[in-house]
Image (tube, helix red, strand yellow):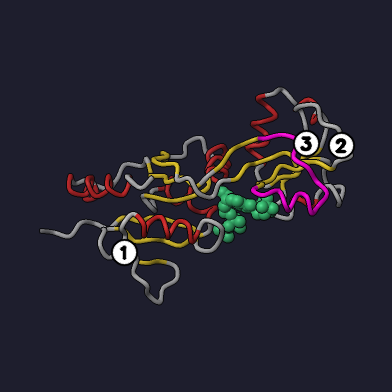
């Protein structure tokens, strides 16, 4: 019997989803080989290699078919997809961990009576496309200010009145004198698969059934 071609599964290298992703794969029965290489690991009992990368790269790699599978937060995936209408991936399982929400927040002093209160305001975020979609769907015009981190500081620095950021416990908002005023997206980790056609050698029936057992993780 010829060995099956190995597939690639992209997981976050270091961050909130790293350990949970590895735990999930272990619980699904995959034996992850511990080697010296901290950028990749071989799975002993399955024709899959894990690739440890930045979470922002995962949708790109899967869409481009560089990795056939990936585990990533829905927030990162949606932001990517809105910028790439030709993105080629499908969500095959919601994984139930990494739950968080993309929330609009502002200082206690700012009145908020619904999305119309955002008209003409500045909103700081690391998710400009998702925020733009939220505004467009509600017919609200506002200025979206993109920040790559420390978004909670924007009101204090007078960069923006509102922020839109990931919230889980809310402790970070509270520590910065901010409160949630609206919800933009509910997120959790998802398993995605490339929609780019697989190379012929990866399309064998045997391989497809291997793929399906991987997909059963949920
Ligand atoms: O280095 P790399 O680019 O891979 O990682 P990253 O720093 O971009 O992401 P990381 O590891 O912080 O988060 C990975 C994913 O975890 C996110 O994309 C979300 O899908 C998910 N997740 C779940 C969270 C949180 N919970 C969360 N609380 N991501 C970020 N946070 C932040 C939040 O924005 C706040 O600043 O954690 C801080 C604490 O949150 P509170 O509300 O509990 O105070
Ligand atoms: Zn990231």
Graded by Cα atoms within 10 Å as few (under 14), some (14 to 19) or many (20 or more), the crowding at tag 1 reads some
Find disc 3 in the rendering and name its residue: 143
Instruction: From the top left corner, tell me how far across and down residue 203 is, in percent.
Output: 23, 45
Quadrant (top left, top right, bottom left, bottom right) of the N terminus: bottom left
User: Of all residues shown, which one is farthest toward the left?
Assistant: 1
Q: Is residue 64 left or right of residue 130?
A: left
- Who's the residue at 56% across and 46% down the image? 99
Q: Residue furthest bottom?
A: 36
Question: Which residue does the image show at 69% across and 45% down from the upper left?
Answer: 165
Q: Is residue 170 visible?
A: yes
Q: Calculate the distance from the C-alpha at mark 2 to the C-alpha at mark 1.
A: 52 Å
Is the distance from the Cβ of mark 2 to the nearest ligand 1 atom less than 8 Å?
no
| Quadrant of image for the C terminus | top left
Q: Which residues are magenta?
A: 168-183
Let me know if residue 191 is in the magenta part.
no
Numbered disc 1: secondary structure = loop
Checking the image for residue 110, the label placed there is 2
Q: Residue at x 53, y 54 (%)?
A: 55
Circles 2 and 1, Cβ within 8 Å, touching? The answer is no
> Does residue 57 appear left or right of residue 122 in this picture?
left
């Amino acid at each position: 019997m010829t060995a099956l071609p190995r597939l690639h599964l992209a997981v976050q290298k270091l961050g909130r989803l790293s350990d949970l992703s590895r735990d999930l794969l272990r619980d699904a029965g995959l034996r992850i080989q511990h080697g010296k290489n901290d950028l990749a690991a071989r799975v002993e009992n399955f024709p899959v290699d894990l690739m440890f990368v930045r979470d922002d790269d995962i949708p790109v790699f899967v869409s481009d078919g560089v990795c056939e599978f990936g585990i990533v937060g829905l927030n990162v995936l949606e932001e990517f997809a809105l910028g790439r209408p030709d993105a080629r991936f499908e969500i095959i399982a919601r994984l139930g961990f990494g739950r968080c929400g993309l929330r609009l927040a502002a200082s206690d002093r700012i009145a908020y009576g619904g999305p119309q209160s955002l008209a003409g305001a500045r909103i700081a975020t690391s998710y400009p496309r998702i925020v733009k979609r939220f505004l467009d769907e509600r017919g609200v015009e506002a200025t979206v200010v993109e920040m790559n981190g420390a978004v909670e500081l924007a009101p204090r620095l007078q960069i923006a009145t509102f922020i839109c950021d990931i919230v889980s416990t809310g402790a970070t908002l509270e520590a910065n004198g901010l409160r949630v005023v609206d919800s933009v997206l509910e997120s959790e980790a998802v398993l995605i698969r490339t929609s780019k056609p697989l190379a012929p050698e990866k399309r064998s029936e045997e391989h497809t059934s291997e793929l399906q057992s991987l997909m059963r993780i949920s």
